[in-house]
Structures are given as structure tokens and as C-alpha cells.
Image (spheres, helix red, strand yellow):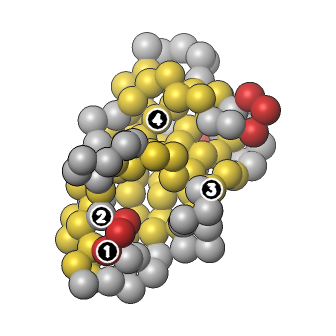
Amino acid sequence: QVQLVESGGGLVQAGGSLRLSCAASIRTSSSYAMGWFRQAPGKEREFVAAINLSSGNTYYADSVKGRFTISRDNAKNTGYLQMNSLKPEDTAVYYCAAGEIPRFVFRPRYWGQGTQVTVAS
């Protein structure tokens, strides 16, 4: 019912910036929030950021707070992750997700295929 397509990944030098996009095809109103997770090779998938699509309230992992900004354009059914001051440890596949945020925790229900972000030292 919800199809998500990520784009905007690539190679960037440490200290640089990238903006990821997540375009959604929504058939029903089953999702009320969107967010981002990331997974490096051999590592567990970890939460990065989430946003309430109605209120605009945002939530961030401590590791990216102050550097990353999540936003959305509801008219375009598109979410964004602006990543500044990138570090080599930010290197991962980034996945867009749609779901809900009950009790301040993002619960994904639908996933995109991911986009690679590589930060060189």
C-alpha cells in the first residue's frame, strides 16, 4: 500500500554534505510518520531520524543530532534527510521507512530499498 524510493546517496568527503530524498506512493492513509535507518556492513540496522508527517515534530539519534535534519514536503509526498558535517562513521546504506511514532519511538511498517552513502576521510 506504501511504496518508498530513496535517492541522493553517493560519495562525499568528510565534513561535506548530502541530502537524501524519499518519495512515497501512498494508496491509503495507514502511515503517519516517516524516518530513516542506516546499516553499515556487518553492523545492526540503527535508527537515524523520524518526523511526524502531520505536526512536523522530529526525533534524532544522539549520533546525528545537530548534524542531520529531517524534513518533509507533504504536497510532494516526499521526505528528506539533510546530512551535514559528515563523518566516515556515517558510511552506510540509508533506508527510508514509513510508520508511526507511538510514545516517542518510531515504529516502521514499510521500507524502501536503500541508498548508499560513503564518506571518505
Mark 4 or 1: the one toward you: 1
Q: Which residue is mark 2?
A: 91
Q: Residues at badges 2 and 3 in contact (C-beta under 8 Å)?
A: no
Callout 3: SS: strand
Of callouts 3 and 4, the N-terminal one: 3
Q: Residue at x 56, y 51 (%)?
A: 49
Of callouts 2 and 4, the N-terminal one: 2
Q: Which residue is mark 1?
A: 88
Q: Residues at badges 2 and 4 in contact (C-beta under 8 Å)?
A: no
Residue 38: image x %, image y %? 38, 49
Of callouts 2 and 3, the N-terminal one: 3
Name the amino acid type tagged 3.
Tyr
Q: Which residue is mark 4?
A: 97
Q: Residue at x 60, y 46 (%)?
A: 50
Q: Residues at badges 2 and 1 in contact (C-beta under 8 Å)?
A: yes
Q: What separation in Å lies between label 1 and label 3 (alpha carbons)?
A: 19 Å
Q: Residues within 10 Å of mark 3 (few under 14, many from 20)?
A: some
Q: What separation in Å lies between label 2 and label 4 (alpha carbons)?
A: 18 Å
Q: What separation in Å lies between label 2 and label 1 (alpha carbons)?
A: 6 Å
Query: 49 above or below 87?
Result: above
Of callouts 4 and 1, the N-terminal one: 1
In-image side of 15 versus 106 (left or right)? left
Q: Residues within 10 Å of mark 1 (few under 14, many from 20)?
A: some
Q: Which residue is mark 3?
A: 60
Callout 2: SS: loop
